[in-house]
Image (cartoon, rainbow, N blue to C red):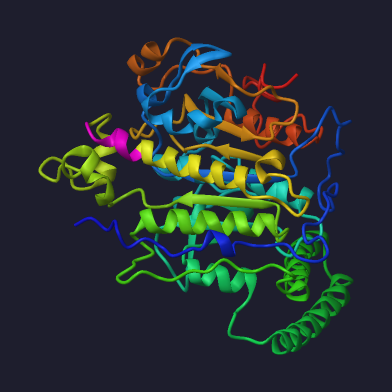
Amino acid sequence: MSRRGRGPVLDRRSLLRVGGASVALPFLHPLFGSRAARAEAGPRPTRLVVFHHHQGQVLPFFTPEGAESAFSLPHVLEPLAAFQDRMVVLTGLDNRNPRLNTVGNAHQNANLTLFTGRPFPVQDAARLTGAGPSIEQVVAERIGGDTPFQRLDFAVGGTSAGGFYTGDRFYYGMGDPVAAFNDPFVAISRIFGDPSVSAEDAWAQRSRRSAVLDAVLDNFRLARRELSGDERARLDAHEDKVVQLEQRIRSGVGACTAPSWTEPGGYDRTYDDDISAPALAEIAVSALACGLTRVVTLELANGHDHAFDWLWGRNGGPIVDTSSFDNWHAMVHADYQPGMEHVYRWYMEQLADLLGLLATTPDADGDPLLDSTLVLYLPEFSSGRHWHNGIPAILAGNLGDAAPGRWLDYLGGTLDAFLAMNNYLDSRATTNQLFTSVLRQFGFDDASFGHEEADWPTGPLEGLAG
């Protein structure tokens, strides 16, 4: 049964308004990063948004046609037409890190290596984890400055524990996965404060918690004197997190007004993606506009057993033919089946809505957020058949010194040849190079990201930037 018609009440008019002094903090060069910034060649992005969904893509419906600067968008990408001149579509990036793993299934090999850019740290099937930090964490450590939240993460759907979803794509560090908000109410109260608590009580509560954390930090400093180098490094990592927590506690909610959220009757945050996606996107953009963070991830986490029933009208019936497939995962694993394109197009509609919010929401200076935000879209596969080669990607918004309005094709041959060879055709570029380019677009001088092998291409993506 369709769940349309009971959507979220998230009042755009009550989105974060900046009053009094400027709330958005100025861009600072890295407090935690080890790389120097390059000389500025023009306006650089000061914010990063990563958009990700599960179960790869359908390349025939995603790959443009035409030339680099004169290309047409295929069915799945048509929702992004309004932003074609503000983005670069990338075709054919290989995630080569799974080749170095000796354990794990195709999903684990993709999920735990994609954004970290590294193979498993331990080749033990019972101890699989990501060898982070992942790319967005590296960026957050360098540009987070003294924002209340070094990063904010949101998941549409997925299993939930207290309003949070812990996935396996994004990592603070090795073996330290990121927990994302997947309950809009919890997200609003945790990020912007509990509206039921008075300003005086909130200030007193923050003061008490900050004093406790000051004592914890003092104990860390005393303990460091007695520790070995490796133990000291682990303690330093914990101290960084405590410092970030103290920044959040001391900052409170500033002069920003939280977005409002009225939960619809019967709402299931683990399933109702059509309700959760726009709600969480609004909250994420509001936090960026208010200067509460500079790095956001938005992950559509339902990738296994989902009906996508709000799309049945487009398909003339259920998306998943249950007489042939047990679930959505089994369907995409069987290669293209009629109806899949509606789901992948819907994902791009959510990306287009996110770009639209960034384009129409001003920052504290009155400029559209999209003008200062680099948006990265990247799935984990190029096909639901678990292909790690030929992955597509999109960069949008502020691209640094990369010219927008282009399609860059890195496939090692034609799309037909790639499909015919069932993923066994190496491209001329890798996902690690994409992440190197992301760092370059922020103005850093990184020569590589993640793991390197002698026969792998390295450096930033060829032809992306000037």
Residue 367 visible in the picture: yes
Range of residues picked out in magenta: 338-343
Q: Horizontal and vertical percent for residue 190?
A: 60, 72
Q: Nearer the viewer, residue 238 or 207?
A: 207
Displayed quadrant of residue 340: top left
**What residue sits 32% from the left and 72% below the top?**
265
Q: Residue 466 at x, y = what percent?
A: 75, 18
Say which quadrant the N terminus sits in.
bottom left
State the residue at coordinates (47%, 70%). Answer: 163
Q: Residue at 67%, 16% (x, y): give it.
A: 463
Q: Quick check: 317 left or right of 391?
A: left
Q: Is residue 37 left or right of residue 209?
A: right
Nearest the viewer among 355 and 28 is 355
Q: Could you say which quadrant of the image residue 455 lies in?
A: top right
Q: Hey, which residue is sitting farthest left in the picture?
A: 323
| In the depicted structure, whether residue 98 falls above or below residue 188 | above
* Position of residue 436 measured from the top left corner of the image (x, y, whole percent): 69, 32
Question: Does residue 327 appear to the left or right of 85 in the view shown?
Answer: left
Q: Is residue 134 magenta?
A: no
- Residue 175 appears in the rendering: no
Q: Is the residue 423 above or below the residue 272 in the image?
A: above
Residue at image coords 48%, 63%: 10
Q: Is residue 340 magenta?
A: yes
Give the camera-side residue of 42 and 257: 257
Q: Main secondary structure of the magenta part?
A: helix
Residue 260 placed where, x, y %?
Answer: 53, 69
Residue farthest to the front? 13
